[in-house]
Every structure is written in structure tokens, then in C-alpha cells.
Amino acid sequence: MDTATRPYRSVLYIPGSKERALEKARELPADAIIFDLEDAVAPEAKAEARETLARALAEGGYGKRSRIVRINALTTEWGLEDVRVLGEAGADAILLPKVNTPSDVDNLADMLGPQVPIWVMMETPASVFNAREIAAHAQVTGLVTGTNDLTKDLGCRYRADRLPLMSALQMIVMAARAARGVVAIDGVYNRFRDGDGLKAECEQGRDLGFDGKTLIHPAQIEVTNTAFAPTQSEIETAERQIAAYEESKASGQGVAVVDGQIVENLHVVAAKRLLGKAEAIREMATE
Ligand SMILES: CC(C)(COP(=O)(O)OP(=O)(O)OC[C@H]1O[C@@H](n2cnc3c(N)ncnc32)[C@H](O)[C@@H]1OP(=O)(O)O)[C@@H](O)C(=O)NCCC(=O)NCCSC(=O)C[C@H](O)C(=O)O
Ligand SMILES: [Mg+2]
């Protein structure tokens, strides 16, 4: 699948220590999986989780789902061994937590070599200030928002409207878009049995421009996949915009009008991108 259009609507964390969850994920309709060795795994379980995860990846069976491994920070006692064991395990990217500066990414890139894509957790105030340079790093292909760590470091309150995090969320999306081709994923919604709250937060994330959302429980996948996919009405509008613009162009005009709104070339670019995304989502569903 084309990496530029591949969907990342639902990005499910799975603790590397949980064999049942690693097994179950082979059947779940998530677009991507983050196999976690960091916060979801207790210190005493880290070594075993690393081996369990290496075996699960070698066994495969994750289909078209993008496989991302979140290692421990390189400054911890587990980070280097995580890279040694999982750096060449065939994951689609290695996700580095607690990044502050581009040089943190350099350190991992030096260890992995230039072929392995790197995703970065954006979860410290310093990472947000350095977002542009981090996203522009040659090996970085994804930014994942860590809203829990950010909330902890900022000392702000959890609010349903996420007002205290708003500038950070926007900086992350902006950095990803400025770097071009870098995926931007929103943080987790902790109340994993609250579907209505999740839906509202997904819609906010989609409105801000995120490609998708990180999840902690399978029950969150369906709501998220729907929220980050183009709606049928958006698809139909995009098709009509493209057709109307082509017709205007053929008659020597640079602007069309659809549903009372102007359609210029830039709207056509956005409309084609939306249709490309819808097609990639359809493709994802065919195993
Ligand atoms: C949150 C959980 C601890 C809940 O677990 P549990 O009570 O076992 O849930 P259920 O009984 O409802 O589970 C039903 C079945 O689903 C499977 N399951 C559960 N979670 C997952 C999962 N994440 N992936 C795949 N499968 C999962 C169970 O095995 C059950 O299966 P079955 O036996 O067939 O019935 C638990 O969901 C969990 O551990 N979630 C992940 C937590 C996690 O990864 N946390 C770290 C990431 S969040 C983070 O770090 C954010 C960031 O860094 C920041 O700073 O913000
Ligand atoms: Mg975190």
C-alpha cells in the first residue's frame, strides 16, 4: 500500500507482555498497532515482554496493519536491548518515547541504520517546542501525541475540550504537515468504555487535522475508524467538485461553484486527496 495514502485512523497500543492481546490483534480492524514495551509494561516484565513481542512479530499474521514497536527511552536500562532485539524484527517503524530534541532521534537513527523509519512520541514540552526540527528529521515518518505525559509535565487539568493542550496539538499537526509526508496521530482517550466521549474527542482530532488516534482498547476501534474516514457526503461532494471544476476549466474558467461555494484548483487537490484516502480505506478492508 502507498505509504502516502495508507490509513492510520486507528492506532492500537498493545502491551508487549500480553500474549492474548498480541494474538487477538491479528483479527482486529485497527489500521496500525503499536506494540508497546514502554509504559504498558511493568519494569519486572520488560525482558520477557521483549522476547514475547519478538516471537509474535516473527510469527506474523498482522496482515495489512502497520506494525510499530514502541521501545523504552534509550536513557533507560532497557532501551539499548530493545533496539538490539527489535530493531531488525521487521516492524514498519520504531517509536521512540520521551523525545526532547532532534539529537535524541539521531541517537536512535545511528543505532538502527538509515533504512528503519522512526516514529516519535511528542509528549514533553521540549518536544513540542522542537516539533518542527523533529518532524523534519530525515528518518522520521510519524508523530504520536502523548497527551497523558504532556498533561503530567504541564501540570494542567484533564478537560473534555482539551483546551490546555490545544496549542501543543496544533503544533504537532503543523510540524508534521510542514515536514510533508509525516503522519500525525492524536493521543489516547483514557475512559475506554465511554464511546460518546471518545467520539467527540475523535471528531475534535479530525477537525484539527490529525490522521488518526491512538487507542488502548479494541472497543475504541470502530468509533475511531468511522470518525477519521471521509463520510459518504464528503465523498459525493468531492466527486461533484472535481466534475464541476473540470467542466469550468473546459469552458476556459478557473473557478466553479458547487453548493453555493467556490471551487478552485486547491479545492480539487483536497477533493482528490479525500477520494484517495477513501480508496485506501476500502483497500485496507480487503485482506
Ligand atoms: C485497559 C486494559 C487494561 C483493559 O483490559 P481488560 O480489562 O483485560 O479489558 P477487557 O476485558 O475488556 O478486554 C476484552 C478483550 O480485549 C483484549 N484486549 C484488551 N486490550 C487490548 C489491546 N490493547 N489490544 C488488543 N486486545 C486487547 C483482551 O485481551 C480481551 O480479549 P479476550 O480474551 O478475547 O476477551 C487493556 O485494554 C490494556 O492493557 N490496554 C492497553 C494499555 C496500554 O497500552 N497503555 C499504554 C499506552 S497509552 C500511553 O502510554 C499514552 C502515551 O504515552 C501518553 O503519554 O499519553
Ligand atoms: Mg507517554
Image (spheres, rainbow, N blue to C red):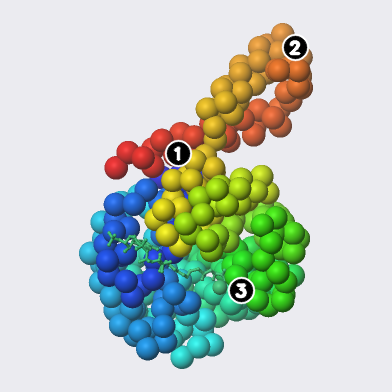
The answer to whether the beta carbon of the residue marked 3 is less than 8 Å from any atom of ligand 1 is yes
Whether residue 219 sits left or right of residue 107 in the image: it is left
SS under mark 3: helix
Whole-angstrom CA distance, mark 2 to mark 1, is: 33 Å
Q: Amino acid at mark 2?
A: Gly
Against 57, residue 7 (above or below) is above
Q: Would you say the residues marked 3 and 2 are in contact, meaning their CB atoms lie under 8 Å apart?
A: no
Measuring from the top left, give residue 187's x and y in whole percent. 58, 61
Residue 280 is tagged as: 1
Point out the tag, 3 or 2, that comes first from the N-terminus.
Answer: 3
Q: Which residue is the site of mark 3? A: 149
Whole-angstrom CA distance, mark 3 to mark 2, is: 54 Å
Measuring from the top left, give residue 280's x and y in whole percent. 45, 39
Taking the spot 53% from the left edge, 63% from the top edge, the residue there is 190
Q: Would you say the residues marked 2 and 1 are in contact, meaning their CB atoms lie under 8 Å apart?
A: no
Whether residue 219 sits left or right of residue 89 in the image: it is right
Taking the spot 52% from the left edge, 27% from the top edge, the residue there is 232
- Quarter, ligand 2: bottom right
